[in-house]
Image: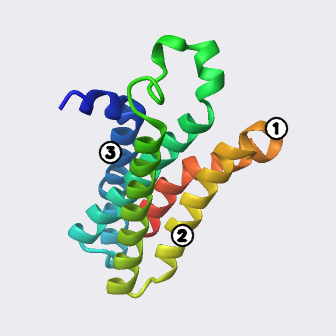
Amino acid sequence: MQLIYPILKLVRYPNLLFIFVTQYLIQYCVIRPVFQKLGISLTLSNGWFFLLALSLVFIAAAGYIINDCFDVKIDRVNKPDRVIIDRIISRRWAISLYTAFNLTGVILGFLIGWKEGYLFLGFTQLLCAGSLWFYSRAYKRQLLIGNIVVSVLTALPVLIAGFF
Protein backbone atom coordinates (compact mmCIF):
# COMPACT_ATOMS: atom_id res chain seq x y z
CA MET A 1 0.00 0.00 0.00
CA GLN A 2 2.87 2.38 0.78
CA LEU A 3 4.19 1.99 -2.79
CA ILE A 4 1.03 3.18 -4.51
CA TYR A 5 1.84 6.90 -4.26
CA PRO A 6 5.46 6.50 -5.43
CA ILE A 7 4.26 4.40 -8.38
CA LEU A 8 1.66 7.05 -9.25
CA LYS A 9 4.40 9.70 -9.11
CA LEU A 10 6.70 7.51 -11.19
CA VAL A 11 4.14 7.12 -13.98
CA ARG A 12 3.16 10.80 -13.70
CA TYR A 13 -0.51 10.12 -13.13
CA PRO A 14 -1.68 13.70 -13.88
CA ASN A 15 -0.16 13.39 -17.37
CA LEU A 16 -1.78 9.98 -17.86
CA LEU A 17 -5.14 11.39 -16.81
CA PHE A 18 -4.61 14.25 -19.27
CA ILE A 19 -3.86 11.78 -22.09
CA PHE A 20 -6.98 9.75 -21.27
CA VAL A 21 -9.29 12.77 -20.98
CA THR A 22 -7.88 14.36 -24.15
CA GLN A 23 -8.66 11.23 -26.14
CA TYR A 24 -12.24 11.25 -24.86
CA LEU A 25 -12.71 14.96 -25.50
CA ILE A 26 -11.44 14.60 -29.07
CA GLN A 27 -13.63 11.55 -29.66
CA TYR A 28 -16.86 12.77 -28.05
CA CYS A 29 -16.69 16.55 -28.51
CA VAL A 30 -15.10 16.76 -31.95
CA ILE A 31 -15.10 13.52 -33.96
CA ARG A 32 -18.45 12.04 -32.91
CA PRO A 33 -20.54 15.18 -33.58
CA VAL A 34 -18.88 15.74 -36.97
CA PHE A 35 -19.34 12.10 -37.97
CA GLN A 36 -22.99 12.15 -36.89
CA LYS A 37 -23.66 15.26 -38.99
CA LEU A 38 -22.03 13.58 -41.99
CA GLY A 39 -23.86 10.29 -41.40
CA ILE A 40 -20.63 8.36 -40.84
CA SER A 41 -20.55 5.65 -38.21
CA LEU A 42 -17.67 5.42 -35.78
CA THR A 43 -15.11 2.68 -36.14
CA LEU A 44 -15.00 1.55 -32.50
CA SER A 45 -17.78 1.02 -29.98
CA ASN A 46 -17.60 2.84 -26.64
CA GLY A 47 -16.09 -0.20 -24.91
CA TRP A 48 -13.39 -0.76 -27.51
CA PHE A 49 -12.56 2.94 -27.53
CA PHE A 50 -12.17 2.86 -23.73
CA LEU A 51 -9.73 -0.06 -24.07
CA LEU A 52 -7.86 1.78 -26.82
CA ALA A 53 -7.49 4.87 -24.62
CA LEU A 54 -6.42 2.66 -21.73
CA SER A 55 -3.82 0.91 -23.88
CA LEU A 56 -2.22 4.25 -24.74
CA VAL A 57 -2.21 5.21 -21.06
CA PHE A 58 -0.41 1.96 -20.19
CA ILE A 59 2.21 2.56 -22.88
CA ALA A 60 2.71 6.17 -21.78
CA ALA A 61 3.11 5.01 -18.15
CA ALA A 62 5.74 2.52 -19.29
CA GLY A 63 7.48 5.32 -21.19
CA TYR A 64 7.70 7.47 -18.07
CA ILE A 65 9.13 4.55 -16.10
CA ILE A 66 11.84 3.68 -18.62
CA ASN A 67 12.75 7.34 -18.99
CA ASP A 68 13.28 7.58 -15.24
CA CYS A 69 15.31 4.35 -15.28
CA PHE A 70 17.74 5.85 -17.78
CA ASP A 71 17.84 9.20 -15.95
CA VAL A 72 18.54 8.03 -12.38
CA LYS A 73 22.14 9.25 -12.38
CA ILE A 74 21.38 12.74 -13.69
CA ASP A 75 18.25 13.02 -11.53
CA ARG A 76 20.31 12.32 -8.41
CA VAL A 77 22.27 15.47 -9.23
CA ASN A 78 19.48 17.73 -10.52
CA LYS A 79 16.56 16.71 -8.30
CA PRO A 80 17.78 14.32 -5.61
CA ASP A 81 14.66 14.71 -3.45
CA ARG A 82 12.37 13.55 -6.29
CA VAL A 83 14.24 10.42 -7.38
CA ILE A 84 12.02 7.36 -6.98
CA ILE A 85 13.97 4.59 -8.72
CA ASP A 86 16.69 3.02 -6.55
CA ARG A 87 15.50 5.10 -3.61
CA ILE A 88 11.87 4.03 -3.06
CA ILE A 89 11.32 1.51 -5.86
CA SER A 90 14.10 -0.81 -6.96
CA ARG A 91 15.25 -0.67 -10.57
CA ARG A 92 14.29 -4.32 -10.99
CA TRP A 93 10.75 -3.61 -9.78
CA ALA A 94 10.54 -0.53 -12.03
CA ILE A 95 11.61 -2.60 -15.05
CA SER A 96 9.00 -5.22 -14.13
CA LEU A 97 6.32 -2.52 -14.03
CA TYR A 98 7.61 -1.12 -17.32
CA THR A 99 7.36 -4.54 -18.94
CA ALA A 100 3.90 -5.25 -17.51
CA PHE A 101 2.51 -1.88 -18.61
CA ASN A 102 3.98 -2.19 -22.10
CA LEU A 103 2.71 -5.74 -22.51
CA THR A 104 -0.74 -4.72 -21.33
CA GLY A 105 -0.88 -1.76 -23.71
CA VAL A 106 0.41 -3.70 -26.71
CA ILE A 107 -1.80 -6.73 -26.04
CA LEU A 108 -4.84 -4.47 -25.75
CA GLY A 109 -3.85 -2.85 -29.06
CA PHE A 110 -3.60 -6.22 -30.80
CA LEU A 111 -6.86 -7.41 -29.19
CA ILE A 112 -8.76 -4.36 -30.39
CA GLY A 113 -7.12 -4.61 -33.80
CA TRP A 114 -7.99 -8.29 -34.12
CA LYS A 115 -11.60 -7.88 -32.95
CA GLU A 116 -12.26 -4.81 -35.08
CA GLY A 117 -10.20 -5.75 -38.14
CA TYR A 118 -7.43 -3.18 -37.68
CA LEU A 119 -4.44 -5.35 -36.87
CA PHE A 120 -2.06 -2.48 -37.62
CA LEU A 121 -3.33 -0.92 -34.39
CA GLY A 122 -1.39 -3.50 -32.38
CA PHE A 123 1.71 -2.77 -34.40
CA THR A 124 1.18 0.96 -33.81
CA GLN A 125 1.14 0.32 -30.05
CA LEU A 126 4.27 -1.82 -30.39
CA LEU A 127 5.97 0.95 -32.37
CA CYS A 128 5.03 3.49 -29.68
CA ALA A 129 6.44 1.29 -26.92
CA GLY A 130 9.67 0.76 -28.85
CA SER A 131 9.96 4.44 -29.73
CA LEU A 132 9.62 5.43 -26.08
CA TRP A 133 12.41 3.03 -25.14
CA PHE A 134 14.68 4.33 -27.92
CA TYR A 135 13.82 7.91 -27.01
CA SER A 136 14.75 7.32 -23.37
CA ARG A 137 17.90 5.42 -24.29
CA ALA A 138 19.34 7.60 -27.03
CA TYR A 139 17.04 9.94 -28.97
CA LYS A 140 16.50 12.53 -26.25
CA ARG A 141 20.21 13.32 -26.34
CA GLN A 142 20.03 14.02 -30.08
CA LEU A 143 18.68 17.48 -30.70
CA LEU A 144 16.45 17.13 -33.75
CA ILE A 145 15.50 13.45 -33.70
CA GLY A 146 14.59 13.57 -30.01
CA ASN A 147 12.26 16.52 -30.54
CA ILE A 148 10.64 14.89 -33.56
CA VAL A 149 10.08 11.57 -31.77
CA VAL A 150 8.58 13.22 -28.70
CA SER A 151 6.36 15.47 -30.86
CA VAL A 152 4.97 12.54 -32.85
CA LEU A 153 4.42 10.47 -29.71
CA THR A 154 2.69 13.40 -28.01
CA ALA A 155 0.33 13.87 -30.96
CA LEU A 156 -0.38 10.17 -31.42
CA PRO A 157 -3.10 9.74 -28.74
CA VAL A 158 -5.04 12.62 -30.29
CA LEU A 159 -4.59 11.22 -33.80
CA ILE A 160 -5.60 7.72 -32.73
CA ALA A 161 -8.68 9.10 -30.95
CA GLY A 162 -9.54 10.95 -34.15
CA PHE A 163 -9.16 7.95 -36.45
CA PHE A 164 -11.00 5.42 -34.31
Q: Quadrant of the N terminus?
A: top left
Q: Give the residue at the far left of this rendering.
A: 1
Which residue occupies the foreground of this view, 87 or 52? 87
| Side of 35 where 156 appears, left or right | right
Q: Position of residue 91 (x, y in %)?
A: 48, 38
Q: Position of residue 135 (x, y in %)?
A: 67, 47
Q: Position of residue 133 (x, y in %)?
A: 61, 52
The secondary structure type at the circle numbered 2 is: helix
Residues at marks 1 and 3, CA–CA distance in whole angstroms: 30 Å
The secondary structure type at the circle numbered 3 is: helix
Q: Give the residue at the far right of this rendering.
A: 143
> Image height check: is 159 above or below 77?
below
- Image quadrant of residue 138? top right
Is residue 40 something one can see in this rendering? Answer: no
Dot 1 or dot 3: first in sequence order is 3
Task: Identify which amino acid the numbered label 2 is placed on.
Answer: Thr
Taking the spot 59% from the left edge, 21% from the top edge, the residue there is 75
Residue neighbourhood size for the residue with mark 2, other residues' Cα within 10 Å, grouped as few (<14), some (14–19), many (≥20)? some
Q: Position of residue 156 (x, y in %)?
A: 54, 56
Colour scheme of the rendered structure: rainbow
Dot 2 or dot 3: first in sequence order is 3
Residue, disc 2: 124
Which residue occupies the foreground of this view, 89 or 6? 89
Task: Identify which amino acid the numbered label 3 is placed on.
Answer: Val
Residue, disc 3: 21
> Image height check: is 163 above or below 155?
below
> Image height check: is 157 above or below 121?
above
Residue, disc 1: 143
